[in-house]
Image: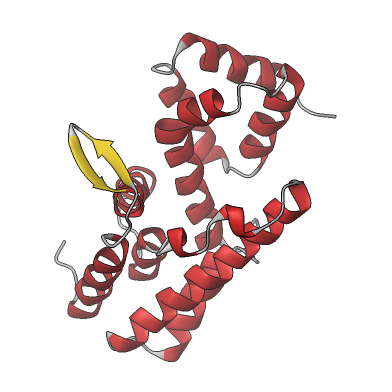
């Protein structure tokens, strides 16, 4: 399927923005700017879950973390409340930036607003596009970052890990659940066992 000129324009501009990330991630032996790598993971999983995604979903997935390094978690205090405030601020920034890029590429105002709303996730569980974005993000986390996060947070006790897994699972649709269970077959044993335990005893 050939991409439209506005879509190509938007994806190229988002890629250019994310390629400025000073942080790096290794993908298939190649060092890439971290948020650029993340955006490629998002696009790959979008097409895994949806064979023919809309242009707005392609843009939203590519812009999910656009320029996130400019708003580091360290700018906010420690604690769960501040973490969620940071996440919400990031979502607003990503939505605004995506809408700005789309406008310069010729998209109508209504389409720009729609993508901005998707990226803020205000309509999660009520809007199919927002739910698909969340599914994609969860799949990318499970595949690429779950193991790294587990190592970084070695001080978390078992119950906290079970809560994290259950809350991630609760945000996903049945379609994403099926994909995650298939992905879990290739997870390290300790992560697979954690997932199985979390799903065997749902959080009350």
Q: Is residue 181 above or below residue 193?
A: below
Relative placement, left or right, of 155 versus 174 is right
Q: Quadrant of residue 92?
A: bottom right
Q: Is residue 120 visible?
A: no
Residue positioned 52% across, 63% down in the render: 71
Q: Is residue 30 above or below residue 5?
A: above
Q: Residue furthest left?
A: 2
Percent position of residue 185, x then y: 42, 16
Percent position of residue 180, x then y: 48, 30
Residue positioned 34% across, 86% down in the render: 107
Q: Quadrant of residue 1?
A: bottom left
Relative placement, left or right, of 1 versus 20 is left
Color encoding of the figure = secondary structure
Residue positioned 42% across, 65% down in the render: 60
Residue positioned 76% across, 25% down in the render: 202
Q: Residue furthest right?
A: 204
Relative placement, left or right, of 30 versus 163 is left
Q: How many marks?
A: 0
- For the residue pair 142 and 110, the one nearer the viewer reads as 142
- For the residue pair 103 and 124, the one nearer the viewer reads as 103
Percent position of residue 58, x then y: 34, 62
Q: Is residue 169 above or below residue 137?
A: above
Percent position of residue 122, x then y: 65, 66
Q: Quadrant of residue 91?
A: bottom right
Q: Is residue 67 visible?
A: yes
Relative placement, left or right, of 157 versus 139 is right
**For the C terminus, which image quadrant?**
top right
Q: Is residue 116 above or below residue 197?
A: below
């Amino acid at each position: 399927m050939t991409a439209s000129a506005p879509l190509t324009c938007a994806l190229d501009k988002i890629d250019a923005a994310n390629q400025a990330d000073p942080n790096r991630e290794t993908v298939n032996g190649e060092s890439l700017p971290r948020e650029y790598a993340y955006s490629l993971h998002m696009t790959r999983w979008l097409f895994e879950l949806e064979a023919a995604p809309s242009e707005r979903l392609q843009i939203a997935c590519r812009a999910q973390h656009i320029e996130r390094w400019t708003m580091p978690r360290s700018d906010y205090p420690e604690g769960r409340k501040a973490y969620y405030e940071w996440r919400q601020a990031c979502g607003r920034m990503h939505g605004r930036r995506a809408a700005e890029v789309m406008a310069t590429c010729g998209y109508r105002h209504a389409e720009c607003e729609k993508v901005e709303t998707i990226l803020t996730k205000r309509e999660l569980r009520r809007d199919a596009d927002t739910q698909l974005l969340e599914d994609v993000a969860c799949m990318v986390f499970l595949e690429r970052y779950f193991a790294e996060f587990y190592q970084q947070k070695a001080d978390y006790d078992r119950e906290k890990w079970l809560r994290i897994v259950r809350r991630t699972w609760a945000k996903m649709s049945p379609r994403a659940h099926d994909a995650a269970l298939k992905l879990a077959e290739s997870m390290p044993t300790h992560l697979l066992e954690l997932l199985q335990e979390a799903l065997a005893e749902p959080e009350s």
